[in-house]
Image (cartoon, rainbow, N blue to C red):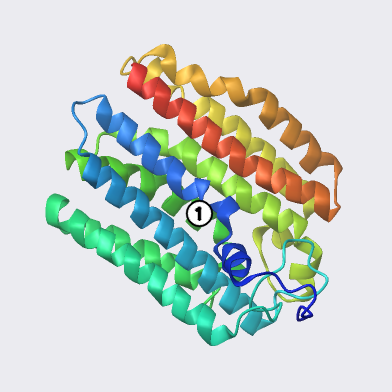
């Protein structure tokens, strides 16, 4: 339902809502991990780090805006959804303006990518183009993969494997096995964020014909999937240490286990919007803290 003049947020607040700032740590986290792993091999190019970080943020914002626009056009963001208001469906911003903002965000990401291509080669062009395309096609295009239960897989790939290894490649122009292994827990936690989101929206997504993984699996199996993702994140992060390549500082993310257990309990026992919104934000915080601690552990190795 469009906001009334009395309840309408300020323009700055509206665009902040559209950018979905709570999702941005998921863009920052893999860049920190990939760069910290590169740190173990020598000096860091800080301009390249800044360009990779900004590029990831602009891709995330562009993806959020694209999803806002596409979901509204498809009728997926209805009045009874349990999550925060979406600016297009809520009548806060005309669709044409959201679309322009999407182009601007992706354009800024491209500018960051041009610098990275100049210093690290054309591999970065493929990485950037694939990331932008994945962001647009999540809810856009003729057959959005987010509506077919493939969202978690693509999040795992692009917010885990691609983002971590790409951030490492920018610094070293090579891809050791440790980069792929350490990308796994990052991707799992990023995917866990989407699992909570889709568990929360399960009923409204089903009515809208949006066949997310949660709709396909059902609530209980989706909750079990969340549990498995959290568990595997804490297990796989130790593999480079157990293989003798990096130090025991890789266990530093274990500090976040109490938070993970609290979030698991909320997801397991609640179906109401406020509780699952809390779990959604908390899972984003968990990923960010996990990755900051992992980056610190790498830098101490």
Residue tagged 1: 155
Q: Is residue 301 left or right of residue 74?
A: left
Look at the image and tell me whether residue 230 can be seen.
yes
Q: Is residue 231 left or right of residue 59?
A: right
| Residue at image coords 24%, 39% | 46
| Residue at image coords 64%, 41% | 283
Foreground: 97 or 208? Answer: 97
Q: Which quadrant would the C terminus be assigned to in this image?
A: top left
Classify residue 150 by image quadrant: bottom right
Task: Give the structural element (helix, strand or loop) at label 1.
Answer: helix
| Residue at image coords 26%, 32% | 38
Where does the image place residue 188, in percent across and percent down from the top left? 54, 42
Q: Which quadrant would the N terminus be assigned to in this image?
A: bottom right
Q: Is residue 206 above or below residue 93?
A: above
For disc 1, the neighbor class at 10 Å (few under 14, some 14 to 19, many from 20) is many
Classify residue 122 by image quadrant: bottom left
Where does the image place residue 84, in percent across and percent down from the top left? 72, 62
């Amino acid at each position: 339902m469009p906001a009334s003049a009395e309840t309408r947020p300020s323009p700055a607040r509206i665009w902040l809502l559209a950018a979905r700032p709570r999702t941005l740590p998921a863009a920052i986290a893999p860049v920190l991990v990939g760069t910290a792993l590169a740190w173990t091999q020598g000096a860091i190019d800080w301009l390249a780090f800044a360009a990779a970080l900004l590029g990831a943020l602009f891709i995330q914002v562009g993806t959020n805006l694209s999803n806002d626009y596409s979901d509204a056009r498809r009728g997926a963001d209805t009045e009874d959804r349990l999550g925060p208001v979406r600016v297009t469906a809520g009548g806060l911003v005309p669709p044409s303006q959201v679309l322009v903002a999407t182009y601007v965000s992706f354009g800024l990401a491209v500018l960051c990518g041009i610098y990275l291509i100049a210093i690290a080669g054309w591999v970065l062009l493929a990485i950037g183009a694939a990331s932008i395309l994945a962001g647009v096609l999540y809810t856009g295009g003729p057959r959005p993969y987010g509506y077919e239960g493939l969202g978690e897989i693509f999040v795992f790939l692009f917010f885990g494997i691609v983002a971590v290894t790409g951030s490492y490649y920018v610094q070293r122009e090579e891809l050791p096995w440790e980069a792929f292994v350490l990308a796994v827990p990052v991707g799992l936690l990023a995917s866990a964020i989407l699992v909570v989101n889709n568990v929360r929206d399960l009923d409204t997504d089903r009515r809208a014909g949006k066949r997310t993984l949660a709709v396909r699996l059902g609530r209980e199996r989706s909750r079990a999937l969340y549990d498995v993702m959290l568990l595997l994140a804490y297990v796989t992060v130790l593999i480079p240490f157990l293989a003798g390549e990096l130090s025991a500082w890789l266990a530093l993310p274990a500090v976040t286990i109490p938070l993970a257990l609290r979030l698991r309990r909320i997801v397991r026992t609640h179906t109401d919007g406020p509780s699952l919104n809390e779990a959604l934000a908390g899972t984003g915080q968990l990923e960010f803290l996990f990755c900051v601690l992992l980056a610190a552990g790498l830098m101490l190795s």
